[in-house]
Amino acid sequence: MVTIRDVAREAGVSTATVSRVLNNVGPVDEETRRHVTAVARRLRYVPNALGRGLSRRRTDAIGLLLPDLFGEFFSEVLRGSDQTAQQAHYHLVVSSSHNNKAEIRAALAMMRGRVDGLVIMSPHIDAETLNETLPHHLPLVLLNCFVQSAAFEALNIDNPAGAAAMTRHLLSHGHTRIAIIKGVEGNFEAADRLRGYRDALRGAGLHPDPALAVAGDFSEASGYDAIKLLLQTHPRPTAIFACNDSMAIGAMSALREAGVHVPQEMALAGFDDVPIASYLAPALTTVHVGIHRLGVLAIERLLKAVHQRDGPRRQQTVLPTSLRIRASCGCLGHPSLRNKDREEKEVINGEGMSM
């Protein structure tokens, strides 16, 4: 591997001169600059990014730790994050699929010294791991993480409010037996959405039926399997709220195979509003999160912390949700939803607004 010393020896100049030429800093006459550049190109010299970053005390890179890269939710978060980082002339270093503390610690240790800041989205992260693994001066933004500490910048979705609003919407259609396909056991987002669903039922004077709360793991397959259980309940539900769109998509497929028509025989709703939701048949009613915007906001917050010389101010932000009312819940054909392009309505805080 060619080093800066090799370039200096071949060019007959000092390593300091080579450094000034390659980093385009400091006084160097034009003839020397051209000569050193030509030698470096001939030797195929590639700067050591890590060493260069250490000398400049910056790497121009941002780390992003995700639980997974599969599915539209994570791809949209990644797309928003990468676009925002690129616009600020930063590179994005991505790591994913860390399902236990040991893997998370290893990923964080890999990022340390290689990035100027870090965005973490992980259901398994905790304050102890962060404090023991990362330097305290490293700018950090937690995205959809449950960490019992106000010492970290955090962005979270208002999951309980979104789930409660969707459940109330289904109740407004006259449904009293509303099933829920739950998320991963022990996941705080899944727990919050389940809580919102139950709170809305109790607010309507209904007792949540345990038989109508079936297990899921946020995957299409678990949504598909949940339908087999729900169709065996007596009396069976007339509406289903899946705790994310992936499970709702799996549920829609299973209902179609079982000959159960959506929404005529079964209303269906999801959570997240992934891009494909509006293109399903029928189009999926869902809780809109603004997934791409999550990635944008996380990077914007992180870059602000990176550039603050007096230390970042810790903000704990809960982002509001809204409803995207489409055909799968039974709203198709309602006069207030007429739109020459497609039938859809956005509901914010219980009030309708045409799109």
Image: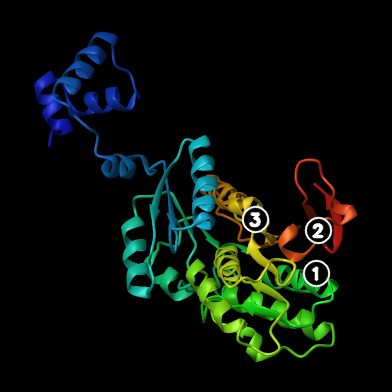
Image location (x, y in percent) of residue 241:
67, 73
Callout 3 environment at 10 Å: few (<14), some (14 to 19), or many (20+)?
few
Separation of marks 1 and 3 at Cα, in angstroms:
20 Å
Q: Would you place residue 59 above or below residue 69 in this image?
A: above
Q: Would you place residue 313 above or below residue 102 in this image?
A: above
The structure residue drawn at horizontal position 28% and vertical position 45%, both measured from the top left corner, is: 50
Label 1 amino acid? His
Mark 2 or mark 1: name the one nearer the start of the chain: 1
Separation of marks 3 and 2 at Cα, in angstroms:
21 Å
The residue labelled by disc 2 is: 347
The structure residue drawn at horizontal position 37% and vertical position 74%, both measured from the top left corner, is: 101
Image location (x, y in percent) of residue 274:
60, 55
Q: Which mark is residue 169?
A: 1
Q: Residue furthest top?
A: 31
- Of the 4 image quadrants, the one containing the N terminus is top left
Instruction: Indicate left or right for 40 with 156 as reference.
Output: left
The residue labelled by disc 3 is: 281
Image location (x, y in percent) of residue 181:
60, 77
Separation of marks 2 and 1 at Cα, in angstroms:
10 Å
Q: Residue furthest right?
A: 335
Q: Nearer the viewer, residue 189 or 335?
A: 335
Marks 2 and 1 close (CB-CB < 8 Å): yes
